Image (spheres, rainbow, N blue to C red):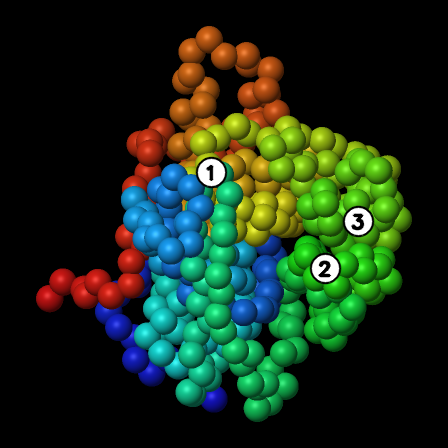
């Protein structure tokens, strides 16, 4: 099994520039691990249709006004982390096809993500997801086969400041315990429990995690709590920091070690495609935590990055970088006649963001497979 691509087809396909800001610059020392955040999982090729007025109707043909392609799955999180300036290492299997080539190049060459622990699997095709965005929601259809296991024990996590894990109800992932034992701070979310059990015992790997970030429905089901706030406090008895996302209501967090809590409302935006917004939220929270920001600032920053992401389509391509964040902060303060009080929640950005002022909106990369580089 190859651990790199022998054929690189042209220049980086995303065209995204390197991060203009290192949020951990004030903390870095020569003894630091080379990796800020490690993650592992499945990379999909995402094909996204936007501009649909309603859900497709059986027996009819629907035309979308917009369409794009991008690496998806765990690539959403990896890209979001890298665009926020964190040195990101991804361990994943890539298909031995053009889709796999595209995703590999987009992540390694376009985003600067370390793929030294990833591999190309001969004869295995890339998993694919088709996502249809309409009415502020999305419908997805996926196809893929599980990749064969690696020939050697390549799943040992590298030394890193943090790792992001997606917990599977009822299953332990040994790498999570190994990472935590090595001093890595583990941040976890969880997928929907298809069994309907919602048994707290199924989240045994939480004992190795520093933070858990479920949505309100997941949190309430696992804790049997009547409200998201009560669910967050219940989860904080099992994990040091519990963050419950509340959709249009924002997010609520509890630090069980200090008793501190924070709630930040969501930023109202016109959503084009919500694909990957949860991953971007987690990436923002991880960034703020590693940078040692106050809890409320971390929560606000995570919500801001997620809000910016849903205004673009594509889970990974929509992840904002510091230039997009700076452009938003510049623009939102220029709106006349607004209440200044909500803006004070984001005043911490003043000490972080680059200058001079930036153009708005920023143009993003072309999310299309197959364009050849100019001769």
For marks 3 and 2 on the same chain, the one whose residue lies earlier in the sequence: 2
Residue shown at the point (32%, 53%) measured from the top left: 61
Q: Quadrant of the C terminus?
A: bottom left
Where 265 sits versus 156, above or below? above
Residue in front for this viewpoint, 301 or 26: 301
Residue shown at the point (18%, 64%) measured from the top left: 373
Residue in front for this viewpoint, 226 or 333: 226
Q: Any mark on residue 221, and which?
A: 3
Using a 10 Å C-alpha cutoff, classify the residue at mark 3 as few (fewer than 14 neighbours), some (14 to 19) or many (20 or more): some
What's the distance in space between the residues labelled 1 and 3, CA to CA? 26 Å
Q: Position of residue 220 (x, y in %)?
A: 79, 45
Residue shown at the point (76%, 71%) measured from the top left: 171
For marks 1 and 2 on the same chain, the one whose residue lies earlier in the sequence: 1
What's the distance in space between the residues labelled 3 and 2, CA to CA? 10 Å
Q: Position of residue 141 (x, y in %)?
A: 48, 61
Q: How many marks?
A: 3
Q: Position of residue 3 (x, y in %)?
A: 46, 82
The residue singled out by tag 2 in the image is 193
Residue 194 lies in quadrant: bottom right
The residue singled out by tag 1 in the image is 135
């Amino acid at each position: 099994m190859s651990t790199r691509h022998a054929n690189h087809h042209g220049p980086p396909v995303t065209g995204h520039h390197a991060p203009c800001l290192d949020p951990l610059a004030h903390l870095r020392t020569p003894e630091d691990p080379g990796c800020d955040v490690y993650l592992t999982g499945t990379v999909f090729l995402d094909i996204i249709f936007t501009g649909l007025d309603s859900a497709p109707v059986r027996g009819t043909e629907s035309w979308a006004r917009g369409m794009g392609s991008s690496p998806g799955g765990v690539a959403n999180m990896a890209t979001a982390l890298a665009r926020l300036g964190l040195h990101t290492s991804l361990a994943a299997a890539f298909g031995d096809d053009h889709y796999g080539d595209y995703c590999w190049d987009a992540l390694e060459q376009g985003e600067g993500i370390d793929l030294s622990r990833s591999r190309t699997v001969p004869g295995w095709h890339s998993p694919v997801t088709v996502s249809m965005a309409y009415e502020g929601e999305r419908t997805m259809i996926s196809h893929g086969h599980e990749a064969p296991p690696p020939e050697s024990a390549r799943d040992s996590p590298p030394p890193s400041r943090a790792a992001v894990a997606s917990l599977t109800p009822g299953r332990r992932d040994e790498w999570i315990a190994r990472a935590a034992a090595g001093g890595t701070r583990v941040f976890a979310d969880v997928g929907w429990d298809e069994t309907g059990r919602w048994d707290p015992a199924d989240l045994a790997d939480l004992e190795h995690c520093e933070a858990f970030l479920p949505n309100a429905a997941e949190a309430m089901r696992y804790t049997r709590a009547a409200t998201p706030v009560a669910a967050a406090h219940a989860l904080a008895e099992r994990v040091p920091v519990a963050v419950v996302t509340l959709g249009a209501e924002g997010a609520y967090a509890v630090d069980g070690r200090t008793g501190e809590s924070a709630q930040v409302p969501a930023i109202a935006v016109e959503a084009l495609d919500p694909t990957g917004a949860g991953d971007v939220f987690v990436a923002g929270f991880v960034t703020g935590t590693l940078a040692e920001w106050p809890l409320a600032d971390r929560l606000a920053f995570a919500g801001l990055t997620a809000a910016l992401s849903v205004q673009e389509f594509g889970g990974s391509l929509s992840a904002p970088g510091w230039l997009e964040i700076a452009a938003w902060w510049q623009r939102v303060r220029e709106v006349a006649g607004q209440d200044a009080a909500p803006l004070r929640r984001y005043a911490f950005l003043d000490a972080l963001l680059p200058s001079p002022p930036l153009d708005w909106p920023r143009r993003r990369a072309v999310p299309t497979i197959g364009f050849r580089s100019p001769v």
